Image (spheres, grey):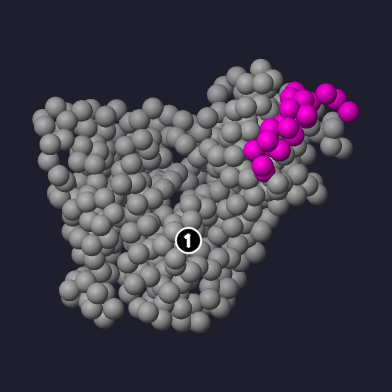
Amino acid sequence: MKETPIKKEIVDRLVAQLGIQDFAKATIREVKQVAAMAEKESGVEYIKMEMGIPGLPAAQVGVDAQIQALKDGIAHSYPDIQGYPGLKKEASRFVKAFIGIDIDAEGCVPVTGSMQGTFASFLVCSQCNPQKDTVLFIDPGFPVQKMQLKVMGVKFETFDVYDYRGDKLEAKLESYLSKGNICAIVYSNPNNPAWICLSEKELSIIGTLATKYDAVVMEDLAYFAMDFRKDLSKPFEPPYQATVARYTDNYMLLISGSKAFSYAGERIGVVCISDQLFHRHYDALSLRYEGLPFGLVFSTRMLYALSSGTSHSAQYALAALLKAASDGTYNFRDEIKVYGERAHKLKEIFLRHGFHVVYDKDLDEPIADGFYFTIGYKNMTSGQLAHELMYYGVSAICLVTTGSHQEGLRVCTSFIEDHQYSQLEERMAIFEANNQ
């Protein structure tokens, strides 16, 4: 056995100290804490791959617009609960430019990050019909969305899409929807953590069944246009960001400023509700909220109760970013494509030393390189692999925490620095030698 870069006793002691009994279920924050403490005690730099935080500077277009709005005195004024009209207009235009669909500005509602967007969406969807009291997740996915449902006491079901791609998705999805209790279907595209991208055929299946069984599709576009296999950077020109919106009227698109524009700190996003859904009346909502339609319940009841609106100056920032992107004067994909380049280099290193990519294909096509990817190693369980890699100064989270049934880890590329490729190469060579 070759000596590991970090002494095993250091890591094991810290894991025990934090009360982590099963490393497979360790949260992102716990993994991060072990890595930080082990790094400090050992003096060995960790290659941190556990946190899904943007690693790039915030887009300057947004920063300039927000500063100007503050200078102009916007901070003294409450934002309109429906959102700054300029942002609503630009969100509608952005959706047309990069997704190729029409949504009226009225239905584009600013939110305090997509996290608030999903929380408010869950609240509305779960109250539309008393018989439909359960949310369905097409997993793997973002663990905090399930935590949101636990906080509000709403039931949910999940399944791992790994074995149900393509035509197989239809029967699996219908097995849940046919029970009549599903109010909403949730997934991210591209996917956190697997980086799979649902095909047009799969989105068509989801949309068709959502219409058939009257469920709302909540499409999380946190990693907007980040399928780097295609050039999705040209406004008002195909190819466009894939979406379920082409196949159903029952949809809400959650567009975040955090990753595409590296604007995570200001907590800004927009929920785009289809025209038909925005104006739809549900008996249960009408009874509870003075006859209001779906869209106005979302904004004037849920968002009003949660935060009384979204940061005023941040709305000006996002409006400027969306406008510049739609105008073609700012190519946001140029700034974030580095994530794909990092993923390509990291995958090569891991594959060279006996690892495999867990979610490796979109049907017959190799998975895109992007913000995340997934790795496994021979017969190791998720918990064993995550714990073992800590001895080598590499931190990542287990797929089990994301609703996946596969053994492996999620790797995030956002904080990788150039000097760390050689570090990873050296450490994984030792790992391979010790795990033959």
* Quarter of the image that includes the C terminus: top right
Q: Is residue 359 above or below residue 436?
A: below
Amino acid under disc 1: Lys
The location of residue 222, given as percent across then percent down, is 41, 48
* Quarter of the image that includes the N terminus: top right
Q: Residue at x 50, y 82 (%)?
A: 179
Q: Quadrant of residue 168?
A: bottom right
Q: Residue at x 20, y 64 (%)?
A: 296
Q: Residue at x 25, y 69 (%)?
A: 294
Q: How many numbered tags mark residues here? A: 1
- Label 1 neighbour load within 10 Å: few <14, some 14-19, many 20+: few
Q: Is residue 421 above or below residue 30?
A: above
Q: Residue at x 71, y 38 (%)?
A: 16
Whether residue 170 is visible here, answered yes or no, is no
**What range is drawn magenta here?**
1-20
Task: Depth check: give the residue in front, 290 or 265.
Answer: 290
The location of residue 121, given as percent across then percent down, is 34, 61
Q: Which residue is mark 1?
A: 150
Task: Depth check: give the residue in front, 369 or 123.
Answer: 123
Q: Is residue 309 magenta?
A: no
Q: Quadrant of residue 54?
A: top left
As helix, strand or loop, the secondary structure at mark 1 comes to: helix
